[in-house]
């Protein structure tokens, strides 16, 4: 491709309008960016009541109203100047940031790519004022009647940048992202009453009474709240508090993990890794806890000025932060009944008592073929001795070295296909593995992996063949959704309908599962739906494009290691 730049071009200053649009693009990526900046400004202004209203995913209309301290009329023009802020004044202030905003870019960036009105009144003013701008240009400033606080209305985002409009997602996706952010802010600031209105419908309204657990119940669900364990741990000037789930409650992804550092919602691989380490001996691979954790650090120990959206921060002492999280969570999990030991798989050698076979096996008849395993499984399966006996049997067998011909190597290299039509179940061991035999071999089967694969093949086959047998439930299953999940209803409900589920709205953030695929049990169906709801929606048509991945992930709802199974189930 020919390069249009030639050496004769001279360096020049860009026009004000163009440079403003470029700078705005770094801060304002989508409607969520606008909501985030405005809500953070409201919190910094001391508001204890914030209402956010959007239409068409925020692309057409965003209104944020607060009862904060307001802005004086004589500061209106300055408020829309780039790098104008009341939150920092010197370079040293960058090492001591307590506010959510500080750069002085938000209002100028929003105004550069939209049509905006700001209406505000301070408590010592007799009348409020309004300023209107379009593409960064002031259209007028007038007095107006209004209550104390600030209202900002943003319309037609990127109206002057059509190319940027094309990159915005469908309305449901933008709605969901905004709802997700507001839920998290409502958790971070439970003392603030936050209301979210989407296309005229109130999706949620928090009480603002300062109770974190009440906010979790309102925004997520009572079921999740009941599974949580309180975390509270101090290490010097650093502190971690909030809630995390017991080992009995987990998800197949990390979307249930929410982190706040000094009141700021952040994303952090470091914090996720610390959580994973804290639960290393509590959860099976592929399972992740739910947590709502608040970390308070000396502002001088973090750098929040590393990304325009301020969603990422840098920790100066990563090891100290990791230790704070691990120790805080482990201390919480050792509370009585907080985290039952997952590995009933771990040998309990002390005071071990020989257990009757009935506790583990359901087939007490000897295996018909006479192989080395016969004496082990025909009478007693003992957790302490089973592997010892197997090793002794194997060590007593001499395995000769047999030369392998080229033809045999070629044959062995071919894909091997096995059929299991004749398997006879022998036992369930450690409530994790199924032992079965045929005429020649002993099979050790991971019960979770086997059931997961069966569910996946069945559901995917039904989905692809558009032939789904459903069963009507006498008593529908009630599920609670988050506001973000409610906003994405059209996407996930479409996929679930194709899989044989019938789900109907039952009220604000509640749905009834009225029919489920005939192949699923009630608890499997409910777990499957919740797993689909937790899928990422930050892409148009995500659920359709990723149906196989979603079905696969949601099949984690299969029986787990630790589940006792009946003979029929096995």
Image (tube, rainbow, N blue to C red):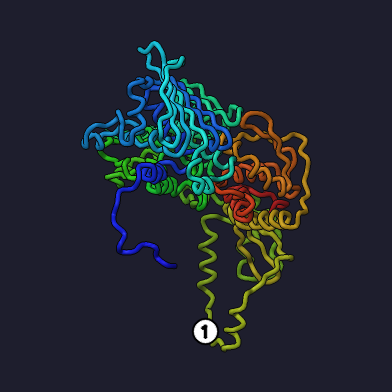
Res 91 quadrant in image: top left
Instruction: Please tell me whether residue 139 is drawn above or below residue 176 in the rendered image.
Output: above
Position of 159 with respect to 471 (left or right) is left
Q: Position of residue 63 (x, y in %)?
A: 50, 28
Can residue 163 be seen at all in this image of the molecule? yes
Q: Position of residue 53 (x, y in %)?
A: 53, 29
Q: Most extreme residue toward the top, as rendered?
A: 126
Residue that appears at 28% across and 54% down: 11
Position of 288 with respect to 355 (left or right) is left
Instruction: Please tell me whether residue 510 is drawn above or below residue 401 in the rendered image.
Output: above
- Quadrant position of the N terminus in the picture: bottom left
Are there few (<14), some (14-19), or many (20+) residues within 10 Å of tag 1?
Answer: few
Residue that appears at 29% across and 43% down: 320
Q: Mark 1 = which residue?
A: 401
Res 149 quadrant in image: top left
Q: Position of residue 413 (x, y in %)?
A: 58, 79
Instruction: Please tell me whether residue 98 is drawn above or below residue 566 in the rendered image.
Output: above
Position of 60 with respect to 267 (left or right) is right
Mark 1 residue element: loop
Task: Give the camera-side residue of 335 and 48.
Answer: 48
Residue that appears at 66% across and 62% down: 436
Q: Most extreme residue toward the front, as rendered?
A: 8
- Quadrant position of the C terminus in the picture: bottom right
Can residue 296 be seen at all in this image of the molecule? no
How many numbered discs? 1
Task: Give the camera-side residue of 172 and 434.
Answer: 172
Q: Position of residue 262 (x, y in %)?
A: 35, 34
Instruction: Please tell me whether residue 307 is drawn above or below residue 389 in the rendered image.
Output: above
């Amino acid at each position: 491709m020919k390069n249009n730049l030639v050496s004769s071009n001279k360096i020049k200053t860009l026009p004000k309008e163009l440079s403003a649009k470029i700078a705005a693009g770094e801060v304002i990526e989508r409607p969520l960016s606008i909501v985030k900046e405005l809500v953070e400004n409201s919190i910094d202004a001391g508001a204890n009541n914030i209402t956010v209203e959007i239409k068409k995913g925020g692309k057409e209309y965003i209104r944020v109203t607060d009862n904060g301290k307001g802005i004086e009329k004589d500061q209106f023009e300055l408020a829309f100047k780039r790098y104008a802020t009341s939150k920092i004044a010197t370079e040293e202030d960058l090492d001591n940031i307590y506010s959510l905003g500080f750069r002085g870019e938000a209002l100028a960036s929003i105004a550069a790519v939209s049509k905006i009105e700001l209406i505000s009144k301070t408590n010592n003013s007799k009348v409020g004022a309004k300023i209107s701008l379009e593409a960064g240009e002031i259209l007028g400033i007038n007095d107006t009647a209004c209550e104390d606080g600030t209202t900002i209305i943003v319309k037609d985002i990127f109206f002057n940048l059509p190319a940027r409009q094309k990159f915005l997602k469908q309305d449901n996706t933008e709605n969901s992202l905004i709802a997700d952010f507001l839920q998290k802010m409502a958790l971070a600031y439970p003392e603030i009453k936050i209301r979210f209105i989407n296309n005229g419908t109130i999706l949620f309204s928090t009480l603002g009474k300062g109770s974190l657990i009440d906010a979790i119940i309102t925004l997520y669900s009572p079921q999740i709240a009941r599974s949580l364990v309180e975390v509270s741990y101090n290490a010097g000037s650093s502190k971690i508090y909030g809630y995390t789930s017991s080992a009995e409650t987990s998800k197949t992804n990390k979307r249930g993990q929410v982190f706040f550092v000094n009141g700021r919602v952040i994303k952090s691989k470091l914090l996720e890794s610390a959580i994973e380490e804290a639960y290393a001996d509590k959860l099976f691979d592929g399972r992740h806890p739910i947590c709502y954790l608040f970390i308070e650090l000396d502002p001088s120990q973090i750098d929040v000025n590393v990304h325009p959206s301020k969603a990422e921060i840098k920790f100066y002492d990563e090891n100290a932060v990791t230790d704070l999280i691990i120790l805080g969570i482990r201390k919480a999990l050792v509370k009585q009944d907080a985290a039952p030991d997952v590995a009933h798989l771990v040998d309990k050698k002390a005071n071990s008592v020989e257990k009757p076979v009935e506790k583990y096996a359901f087939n007490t008849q000897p295996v018909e073929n006479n192989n080395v395993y016969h004496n082990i499984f025909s009478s007693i399966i003992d957790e302490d001795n089973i592997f010892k006996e197997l090793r002794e049997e194997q060590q007593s067998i001499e395995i000769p070295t047999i030369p392998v011909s080229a033809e045999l190597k070629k044959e062995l290299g071919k894909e091997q296909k096995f059929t299991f039509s004749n398997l006879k179940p022998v036992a369930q061991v450690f409530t994790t593995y199924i032992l079965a035999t045929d005429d020649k071999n002993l099979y050790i089967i991971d019960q979770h992996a086997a059931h997961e694969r069966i569910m996946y093949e069945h559901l995917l086959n039904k989905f692809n063949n558009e032939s789904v047998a459903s069963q009507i439930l006498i008593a529908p299953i009630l599920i609670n959704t988050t506001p973000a999940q409610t906003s994405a209803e059209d996407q996930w409900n479409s996929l679930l309908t194709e899989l044989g589920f019938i789900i109907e709205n039952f009220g604000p953030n509640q749905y009834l599962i009225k029919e489920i695929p005939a192949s699923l049990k009630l608890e499997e169906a409910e777990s499957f739906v919740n797993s689909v709801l937790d899928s990422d929606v930050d892409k148009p048509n995500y659920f359709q494009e990723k149906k196989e991945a979603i079905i696969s992930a949601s099949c984690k709802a299969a029986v787990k290691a630790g589940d006792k199974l009946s003979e029929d189930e096995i």
